[in-house]
Image (cartoon, rainbow, N blue to C red):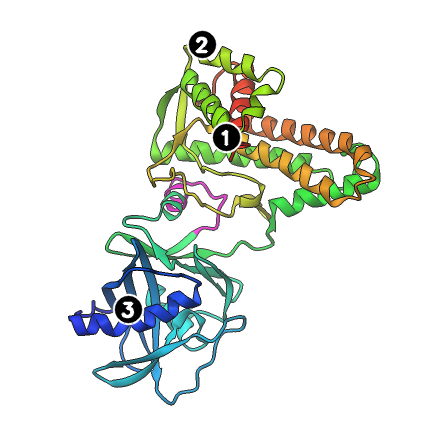
Amino acid sequence: MIGAMLELTEARRESFVPLMQTWLARRGVDHAGTIEVIEVEVLLAGRPGLLDVVARVDGRIAHLVLGLHGIHQEIRMLRGADDGVLGEFEDEQGVALAVDALWDVELAPLVMIAIVGEEPGVVSIAHDDDNAVVLDIEDTSSFSVFPWLTDGPRPAVDMLVRLDEVGFNHLAAPIALWRRQGRDLGIVQELLMGSAAGWALAMTSLRDLYGSGVKPEQAGGDFAVEARALGTMTARMHLASDKAFGRRNGAVADWAAEAESVAERLSPDLLAVPGARERLRALRGSGDRSVMVRTHGDLNLGRVARTDHGWVVADWLPGGVDAEGAPLFRSPLADVADVLWSLHRLAVAALEERDPALRPGLESAGAAWEERNRQAFLAGYLGTPGIEELVPADRAVVSELVAVFEMARSTA
């Protein structure tokens, strides 16, 4: 079970600072200010021991799971981990060797036990970056620990948990949530078995098309069935978001004006595309209003995966919030436009792989692939029962809005 909070005298706070400095350096973080340790929880007392440390560093909140070994004990790191030794630490039981517990063969499983109360299987490091240190638990679950925290719930975790609660199962289901003082420290999730990244699947389809010299629907790797299923999954996500977070109402004219303003500032050439100015002018003059829900915020083929049971959202960043961390309510068609934009980007990327001399003959095939899969995605999305409550009834308006949101997305 998780233990008590450590009483922090000034001397005790200072004893953690050199260890935090080494940990930050290992993560490639240059900090100019002071390190203020704000709380330490005893996950496991003694040797081995576990202390969960939270500190403020240059306006950010850092999170280190500190492991303690006897001073002469052999330290073994998980495969793929660097040297996790951070230095020496002294407490009431004497001097200990302090390590990054998530990299340690003996201690990483003990962290899991402290959080979920169960003995894990074999633990290995699956991923480590500023978003999370992800441990793979013997092909059954994943344990993500966040090295940087937010004051309040983590948006991506909040969205994942809330959507799961209302029955949206196109995700890696949360098994346990590690939270303290209102901050999300980590999460244990069901492992996505047999998953393949959406970007990789679509890229394989394009490569097959370019290599076969046939029409997209005749190619062995035709992606249209998958694109349609992905559209259905996206619609179900928006319906679940409506149920979990509620809806708001927005003006079509405001969305068009915002998109035009972004394009003017960042990519004015987009406004020179035939029909762009006319489309924006018509929507700016519209008196229509439409539903806004809490959207994913950056849905694309790189954030979804195809599993044995269908499509899932594999990456919940940015978690339906804006740059300031406020809940992001948009037309659900903005997420749709993000996916369609990624289909275009993928077609361009696949073409750039080919010999420059061959590209002119393949451009039409890439354009046909993109159009076929755009239409399949939209058919799946708009054909999902209930989605008519969230998008304009006029399909022409839907088409115009998607084009405007896609234009805005391409400026990012």
- Above or below — where is 67 with respect to 396? below
- Above or below — where is 86 with respect to 343? below
SS for tag 3? loop
Residue 58: image location, x then y, percent: 30, 56
Depth check: give the residue in front, 64 or 5.
64
Which stretch did the figure color magenta?
Answer: 160-173
Residue 172: image location, x then y, percent: 48, 50
- Mark drawn on residue 1: 3
- Mark drawn on residue 266: 1
Q: In the drawing, does residue 405 fall left or right of residue 58?
A: right
SS for tag 1? helix
Please state which of the two labelled residues, at mark 3 or mark 1, is closer to the viewer: 1
Q: Which residue position is annotated with label 2?
A: 285
N-terminal label among 1 and 2: 1
Residue 62: image location, x then y, percent: 33, 60
Is residue 177 visible in the rendered image? The answer is no
Residue 98: image location, x then y, percent: 35, 78
- Above or below — where is 345 with respect to 48? above
Measure the alpha-carbon separation of dots 3 and 1.
52 Å
Measure the alpha-carbon separation of dots 3 and 2.
61 Å
Is residue 330 visible in the rendered image? The answer is yes
Instruction: State which quadrant residue 407 falls in.
Output: top right
The N terminus lies in which quarter of the figure?
bottom left
Please state which of the two labelled residues, at mark 1 or mark 2, is closer to the viewer: 1
**Residue, far front:** 32
Q: Are marks 3 and 1 in contact (CB under 8 Å)?
A: no
Magenta residue check for 347: no
Instruction: State which quadrant residue 52 falls in.
Output: bottom left
Q: In the drawing, does residue 55 fall left or right of residue 207?
A: left
